[in-house]
């Protein structure tokens, strides 16, 4: 579920490299719109993966996607989820795409979530309905429909593998789907709890949006016309923890790692890579930068990133090779041929800052320090929001309410990220100071 550039550069690439016998194939369903399926279906799912290093491009044609489908095609989705040959479902829908609250419950303030609950409550009362017209539009609503069909078909267990940047993403998605099932069909919820595994993952591969020039590059490198190439960096990393009761591709052949304890790897990636990205997306943008490479070349931004990493590293465990990991991150950020745009990274700031910056601030405050390095990221975000800079966010209604508040706007904005931060006067003062320096006439 999710057919964006990252899923193709990551899961599709790993599967293509690992599956030497052709035993495995990916049926990929789009999320927000059908565009990717419309581009890939005429190409039989084939696409060009362009690996862009600092000095050259190389290309591989990836063949692991055997079916590209509009996510709204619930008939095909249900057929596949109910098939015994389906062994696992990967999810790449972004953090906000799960439509869950911070504690992993369906967001009842979301109209689409409530509409799905109403439809599923009626449709899952017995056998599957003859028509899925008006059926679920949310990721978890569709997934629950498919799992219900699998239970009725007696197709056996399978694994759910979220591949988005959330801490403990396996348990987080499990709590969300079980809470949703409890609302609409507790019997299916009990079956999911017993038969479905939720695998936690840490995923890492910078994959910017494809441009028209990349389409031309794909032709020049392969000789084949491709309407849906993907550009990515040579670096890739995938760490997984959990059971696969119906089997899986041998992703370790492509370099994936399977571990018993994934939290240290999740935190390293979320705080060091994603956290620095968010810092640059807001603070770098305030300094006039548009890409990661441009921002990291700015000595001021580079210093802020270093300070951010120092603060985060103080709360990461041993055995993570942080010195080399940070050095590799700088090299990746400096690759100007990967045009990773700050506007793209800056979307969904509330959800992202909640897991990338807030935990570092809280840990630093608990250790008796200011947390200023991570406060800077949230303060820069607040400055952009207050200046009405376009920052698409699933929490747009809450942001609008905060901006219209008769009380302190900064406090109301920070409360959206983590209420604990809004109760710390020193943290609020630090955020206000950053915002005021950026926008003295607004903050």
Image (cartoon, rainbow, N blue to C red):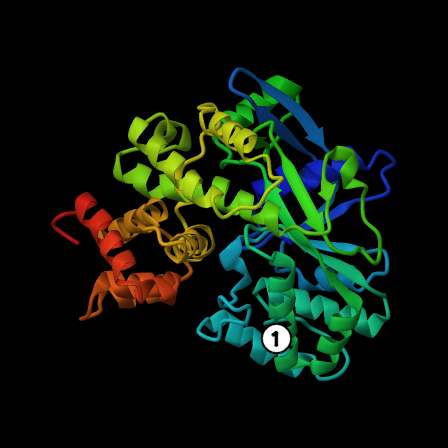
Q: Residue furthest left?
A: 441
Q: Is residue 113 left or right of residue 358?
A: right
Rendered residue at 69%/70% (across/down): 145
Mark 1 highlights which residue?
A: 179
Q: Nearer the viewer, residue 77 or 236?
A: 236
Query: In which quadrant is the N terminus drawn?
Result: bottom right
Residue 44 seen anywhere in this rendered image of the structure: no
The location of residue 208, given as percent across then percent down, is: 50, 35
Query: In which quadrant is the C terminus drawn?
Result: bottom left
Q: Nearer the viewer, residue 338 or 22?
A: 338
Rendered residue at 61%/57% (across/down): 169
Name which quarter of the figure residue 429 lies in.
bottom left
Q: Is residue 266 above or below residue 394?
A: above
- Neighbourhood count class around disc 1 (C-alpha, 10 Å): few under 14, some 14–19, many 20 upward: some
Disc 1 secondary structure class: helix
Q: Residue furthest top?
A: 55
The location of residue 325, given as percent across then percent down, is: 55, 33
Rendered residue at 81%/48% (across/down): 248
Q: Is residue 165 left or right of residue 386?
A: right
The location of residue 111, given as percent across then percent down, is: 46, 72
The location of residue 256, given as percent across then percent down, is: 72, 39
Q: Is residue 112 left or right of residue 90?
A: left
Q: How many marks?
A: 1
Q: Is residue 6 left or right of residue 438?
A: right
Q: Is residue 319 above or below residue 407?
A: above
Q: Nearer the viewer, residue 64 or 219?
A: 64
Q: Is residue 292 above or below residue 4?
A: above
Residue 215 seen anywhere in this rendered image of the structure: yes
Rendered residue at 70%/79% (across/down): 124
């Amino acid at each position: 579920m999710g057919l964006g550039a990252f899923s193709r550069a990551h899961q599709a690439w790993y599967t293509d490299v690992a599956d030497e016998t052709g035993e495995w194939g990916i049926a990929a369903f789009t999320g927000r719109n059908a565009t990717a399926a419309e581009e890939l279906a005429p190409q039989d799912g084939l696409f060009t993966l362009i690996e862009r290093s600092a000095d050259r491009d190389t290309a591989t044609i990836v063949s692991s996607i055997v079916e590209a489908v509009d996510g709204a095609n619930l008939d095909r989705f249900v057929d596949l989820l109910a098939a015994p040959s389906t062994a696992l479902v990967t999810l790449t829908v972004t953090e906000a795409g799960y439509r869950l609250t911070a504690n992993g419950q369906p967001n009842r303030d979301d109209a689409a979530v409530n509409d799905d609950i109403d439809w599923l409550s009626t449709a899952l009362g017995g056998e599957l309905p003859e028509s899925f017209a008006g059926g679920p539009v949310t990721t978890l609503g569709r997934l629950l429909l498919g799992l219900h069909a699998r239970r009725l078909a007696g197709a056996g267990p399978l694994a759910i593998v979220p591949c988005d940047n959330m801490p403990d993403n396996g348990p987080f998605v499990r709590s969300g789907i079980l809470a949703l099932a409890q609302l609409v069909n507790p019997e299916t919820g009990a079956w999911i709890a017993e038969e479905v595994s939720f695998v936690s993952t840490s995923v890492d591969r910078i994959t910017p949006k494809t441009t028209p020039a990349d389409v031309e590059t794909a032709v020049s490198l392969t000789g084949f016309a491709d309407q849906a190439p993907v550009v990515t960096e040579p670096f890739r990393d995938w760490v997984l923890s959990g059971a696969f009761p119906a089997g899986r591709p041998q992703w370790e052949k492509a370099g994936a790692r399977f571990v018993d304890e994934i939290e240290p790897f999740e935190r390293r990636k979320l705080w060091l890579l994603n956290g620095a990205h968010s810092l640059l997306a807001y603070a770098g943008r305030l300094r006039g930068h548009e890409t990661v490479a441009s921002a990291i070349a700015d000595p001021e931004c580079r210093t802020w990133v270093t300070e951010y990493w120092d603060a985060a590293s103080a709360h990461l465990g041993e055995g993570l090779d942080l010195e080399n990991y940070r050095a590799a991150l700088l090299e990746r950020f400096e690759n100007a041929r990967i045009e990773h745009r700050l506007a793209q990274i800056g979307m969904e700031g509330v959800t992202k800052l909640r897991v990338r910056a807030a935990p570092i601030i809280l840990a630093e405050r608990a250790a008796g320090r200011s947390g200023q390095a991570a406060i800077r990221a949230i303060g820069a975000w607040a400055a952009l929001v207050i200046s009405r800079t376009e920052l698409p966010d699933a929490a747009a209604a809450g942001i609008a309410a905060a901006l219209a508040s008769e009380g302190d706007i900064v406090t109301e904005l920070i409360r959206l990220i983590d209420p604990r931060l809004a109760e710390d006067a020193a943290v609020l003062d630090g955020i206000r100071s950053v915002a005021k320096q950026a926008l003295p006439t607004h903050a």
